[in-house]
Image: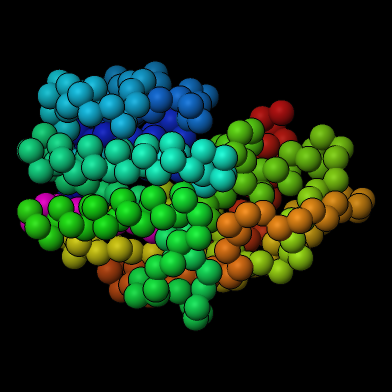
Amino acid sequence: MRARNKRLLVTGGAGFIGSHLCDKLLERRPERIVVLDDFSLGKMENLTQLKQLDCVEIVKIDASDYEAMRKLYSAMDIDVTFNLAVIPLPASLKEPKRVIDMNILITSNLCDLLQRGYYDTLIHTSSSEAYGTAIYMTMNEDHPTQPITPYAASKLACDHIALSYHMTFGLDIAIVRPFNCYGPRQNEKSYAAVIPITINRILAGEPPIIQGDGQQTRDFSYVEDIAEAIPKIYELPSTRGRVINLATGKEMSIHNLIHMIMKLMDYSGPVIKEPSRRGDVRRHCGDISLAYRLMGYAPKTGYEEGLRRTIEWYRKSR
């Protein structure tokens, strides 16, 4: 399977990971890329390289709206859908029902339209939050799933829905499970994550914040490494019906992360300590041996280099 000359749809395509994925898909010379986003978090400026191209079409649609999605598929004759549309984790701490309902609707809509023959293949994006806190290290795809937040529970439910359509109807579906993406274009405003928050606070002359004791860990994955791997998952039939981790296999504490950012930005001021965030997992570190066996996946970007690029992007974007 190749993306060349195919008609591709990327839901959430104006978002952080979605826009980077669109850039990587464009390198494969598809016939068309349809970038779908409701622009609640996605940004038109994330599509600067794409929006002037004849082979790219940008549409504003809420992927949870079944009839709007059905009409789009009828009009566009899509071959492959890459699903990155999601309501993020921090929103679920304020509006849990809305996040659960929306995330499940998006996935069930896409699965139903696939089953009805509107397109051929679904590459669905999961989240490492589905695992919950690590019971053992490193966390492979057989690690127990014990989601903590409503967001994490909704993402795990979406994975089960997608896999059920694969198993029941034999549909062409694979699931990508990235660990804690960071990099240029990551949302820095509503529902921002720790890296853009920390960088932008220092750029604004404000002290960074550590929530809890700072010893909670994550496997921070540079976005371009993740975006480069997702098309390969589509291109390999051996990925079908599987959940595939994309990570670095390296554990980083929030304390060490923030102090690395401080060092790279020549900041030596105070750090604010705040209570732990609700629903914060304690440890995460992904096992990527399956992705390596299937497609030779090995992340190219180390923490320091990835953070340098990210800091520089936020500095220029201000």
Residue 245 visible in the picture: yes
Q: Is residue 309 above or below residue 214?
A: above
Q: Residue at x 50, y 78 (%)?
A: 135
Q: How is the image coloured?
A: rainbow
Q: Position of residue 179 (x, y in %)?
A: 48, 59
Residue 121, given in percent of the width and then of the height, sits at 17, 46
Residue 202 location in percent, x, y? 81, 42
Q: Is residue 111 left or right of residue 245?
A: left
Whether residue 144 is situated above or below residue 101 in the rendered picture? below
Q: Is residue 318 above or below residue 126?
A: above
Q: Is residue 227 left or right of residue 312?
A: left
Q: Residue at x 40, y 68 (%)?
A: 145
Q: Say whether residue 55 is magenta.
A: no
Give the magenta part as a residue range: 170-179
| Residue appearing at x 39%, y 64% in the figure | 245
Per the image, is 171 magenta? yes
Q: Quadrant of the C terminus?
A: top right
Residue 226 rendering spot, x and y as whole percentages: 43, 53
| 22 or 270, nearer to the observer | 270
In the shown orientation, is residue 210 left or right of residue 21?
right
Name the quadrant containing residue 210.
bottom right
